[in-house]
Amino acid sequence: MKNSNLYKLLIALPLAASLTGCIIVGTDDGPDANWINSNSDSAWKEEQRVNNQKIADLQLGDSFEKVRSLMGTPRFNEAFEKEGKAVQVIFYRTMHKHSDGETTKDECTALIFKGGELVAFGDKAYSRL
């Protein structure tokens, strides 16, 4: 009887070990979900095209609310106070630099608001902050 149980154990252990493994289940609902779930690069290319077109139509002096309504949710958002005025910088993806599935600030255009009003946009304006 002891040999029979030992035999069964010796058969079951390798079989059990071969059946175990890692299963990773998840969803990506983050900002780059379209990029990850897309069969091509068309999703991020379209986002960039649309964002560039919308930014080209912006006017200095536009309100924060108007810009957010037109542009939608930004990829990044910064806020701070400078010289007694509230400054808010929002970033929208407008260019491709890295093929890593992540959007970084260097792939975005910064829109700069002071006192709730658009005062500047682009790399040069952001670097002067």
Image (cartoon, rainbow, N blue to C red):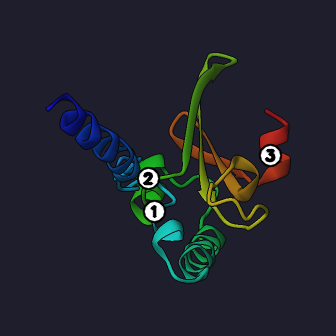
Q: CA distance from mark 2 to mark 1?
A: 5 Å
Residue kind at label 3, given as amino acid type: Ala
Secondary structure at numbered mark 2: loop
Residue kind at label 2, given as amino acid type: Gly
Residue kind at label 1, given as amino acid type: Ala
Dividing the picture into quarters, in which one does residue 33 lie? bottom left
In x, y percent, where is residue 84?
Answer: 62, 16
- Screen quadrant of the N terminus: top left
| Comes first in the chain, label 2 or label 3 | 2
Residue 33's disc number: 1
Secondary structure at numbered mark 1: helix
Q: CA distance from mark 1 to mark 3?
A: 29 Å
Residue 107's disc number: none
In x, y percent, where is residue 65?
Answer: 41, 50
| Residues tagged 2 and 1 counted as in contact (Cβ below 8 A) | yes
Q: Which residue is mark 3?
A: 125
Residue 30's disc number: 2
Neighbor class of circle 3 (other Cα within 10 Å; few <14, some 14-19, many 20+) is few
Neighbor class of circle 1 (other Cα within 10 Å; few <14, some 14-19, many 20+) is some
| Residues tagged 1 and 3 counted as in contact (Cβ below 8 A) | no
